[in-house]
Image (cartoon, rainbow, N blue to C red):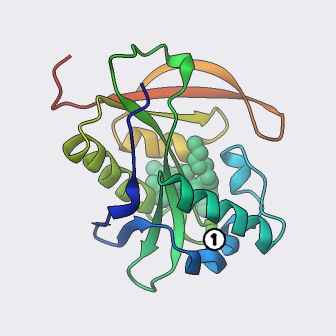
């Protein structure tokens, strides 16, 4: 089953980031990174064309209560996000086990500094220690080496290859991974 999730009260501090719910005042920051070419396409969505598109997505983030904003302590800007999405049915996980698929995106300006592994590890800790998920899954397009590095740094185990249809109807060879909660007996 998809584990129930409500991130409205989440606040997690890492060395360089504050992980917290999205706010309406984050609109300019979201548009700034989501409108850059070559970011969303790595995750299956197209760059935002205008600020109204970002506004609609931001409303979805806030109302959906499953997407966490990544605020950089240095400058107070939101530079990325992590979503706890519905699990991928291709993994055939038993209904008795509760978990979610983790998805993430970071502003191009901040790539290569280990910020996403830092954030993902903190979210894994929250999902396993506080929310008692049985597992988290993750997937990346075959061509997305950057995401593969994050997945590996965070300890996920490869499960299988699938073909994923993106929101803009392209097909992407995709690798799926899982990480089981070490604190839960299986
Ligand atoms: C995937 C992503 C979140 C990685 O975040 P990050 O904080 O940069 O992660 P890391 O710092 O650990 O870097 C991961 C790898 O990216 C590569 N990388 C770093 N800077 C890069 C750059 N400017 N251009 C291309 N690749 C780069 C490096 O190979 C690095 O691995 P290494 O640290 O072992 O050398 C980020 O690249 C991103 O947001 N990409 C677009 C959206 C996306 O792919 N989302 C995931 C969908 S599954």
Query: Residue 3, position in %: x, y?
Result: 38, 34
Residue 93 image-quadrant placement = top left
Q: In the picture provided, is 81 more to the left or to the right than 54?
A: left
The extreme bottom residue here reads: 75
Q: Report the residue marked by disc 1.
A: 30
Query: Residue 63, position in %: x, y?
Result: 55, 58
Residue 109 image-quadrant placement = bottom right
For the N terminus, give its image quadrant: top left
Residue at position x 16%, y 21% from top?
185
Considering depth in this image, is 116 or 35 the residue closer to the camera?
35
- Asked whether the viewer can see residue 64, the reply is yes
Residue at position x 65%, y 45% from top?
43
Q: Within 10 Å of the Cα at label 1, are there few (<14), some (14-19), or many (20+) other Cα atoms?
A: many
- Asked whether the viewer can see residue 105, the reply is no
Identify whether 60 is placed above or below 96: below
Q: In the picture provided, is 170 more to the left or to the right than 153?
A: right
Q: In the picture provided, is 66 more to the left or to the right than 49?
A: left
Considering depth in this image, is 135 or 176 the residue closer to the camera?
135
Q: How many marks?
A: 1
Task: Look at the numbered disc 1 and say if its residue's Cβ is closer than 8 Å to ligand 1.
Answer: no
Considering depth in this image, is 15 or 166 the residue closer to the camera?
166
Query: Residue 99, position in %: x, y?
Result: 38, 31
For the C terminus, give its image quadrant: top left
What kind of element bears circle 1? helix
Ligand number 1: quarter of image: bottom right
Residue at position x 44%, y 40% from top?
151
Residue at position x 43%, y 76% from top?
72
């Amino acid at each position: 089953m998809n584990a129930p999730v409500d991130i409205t009260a989440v606040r997690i501090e890492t060395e360089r980031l504050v992980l917290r719910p999205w706010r309406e005042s984050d609109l300019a920051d979201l548009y700034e990174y989501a409108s850059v070419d070559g970011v969303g396409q790595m995750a299956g969505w197209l760059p935002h064309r205008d600020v109204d598109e970002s506004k609609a997505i931001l409303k979805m983030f806030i109302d959906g209560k499953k997407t966490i904003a990544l605020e950089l302590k240095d400058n107070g800007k939101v530079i990325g996000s992590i979503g706890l999405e519905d699990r991928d049915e291709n993994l055939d996980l038993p209904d008795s086990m509760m978990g979610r698929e983790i998805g993430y995106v970071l502003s191009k300006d901040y790539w290569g500094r280990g910020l996403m592994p830092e954030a993902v590890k903190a979210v894994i800790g929250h999902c396993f220690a506080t929310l008692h998920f049985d597992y988290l899954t993750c997937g990346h397009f075959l061509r997305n080496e950057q995401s593969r590095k994050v997945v590996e740094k965070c300890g996920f185990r490869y499960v299988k290859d699938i073909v994923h249809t993106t929101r803009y109807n392209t097909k992407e060879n995709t690798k799926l991974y899982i990480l089981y909660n070490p604190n839960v007996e299986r």
